[in-house]
Amino acid sequence: MEMPSPLCHFELMTDDPERAQAFYGAVFGWSFDNESMPGYALINAGAEPSGGMMRRPPEAPSAAFHTYFQVDNVSVALHKAASHGGRVVLPATEIPHVGTMAMVADPDGVVIGILKPQSD
C-alpha cells in the first residue's frame, strides 16, 4: 500500500551543529555534507541525503527535529491544514534545487513540514 503523502525529509535545528554532528555520527553512523549548501549540512543516513541540519534560528522556540511530508501542492496542503485547526508557521517558500516547502502547526502545536520536491 502506498502512503499518499510519504515522509520525505527530516531536519534538525540545533544550537550546536558541530556537537550534533559528532553525536549523530557516533550513535547512528551518519555522515554529513557541509559543503553543498552554506549554513546547512545534508545528512547522509543511507544511500542518498535524507535529512538536513542547521543552526537554530533565533525565532525558533527550541532545538528540534522537523519531519517533512511530500505533497503535490503546497498551497492546497496549507489550506487543508488551516481548515482543520492547524496554523501556518512558515508560508510556502521556494528553496533552490530542492522545491517548495512550508511549515504548519497541527491543532496541538506540533510543527511539521510540507514539501513539494522540485521537478527534474
Image: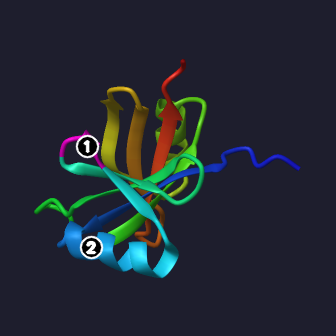
Q: Are the two marked residues, 2 and 1, in contact with CB atoms closer than 8 angstroms?
A: no
Place of residue 76 in the rendered image (x, y in percent of width and height, measured from the top left) = 53, 33
Place of residue 87 in the rendered image (x, y in percent of width and height, measured from the top left) = 39, 54
- Label 2: few (<14), some or many (≥20) within 10 Å? some
Q: Nearer the viewer, mark 2 or mark 1?
A: 1
Q: Nearer the viewer, residue 29 or 49?
A: 29
Residue 93 occupies quadrant: top left
Q: Which label number is shown at residue 85?
A: none
Q: Nearer the viewer, residue 110 or 66?
A: 66
Q: Is residue 33 visible?
A: yes
| Residue 99 in the figure: left or right of residue 22 | right
- Residue that mark 1 sits on: 35
- The three-letter amino acid code for the residue at tag 2 is Ala
Residue 35 is inside the magenta segment: yes
Q: Residue at x 53, y 40 (%)?
A: 77
Q: Which label number is shown at residue 63?
A: 2
Place of residue 83 in the rendered image (x, y in percent of width and height, measured from the top left) = 52, 47
- The three-letter amino acid code for the residue at tag 1 is Glu
Q: Which residues are magenta?
A: 34-38
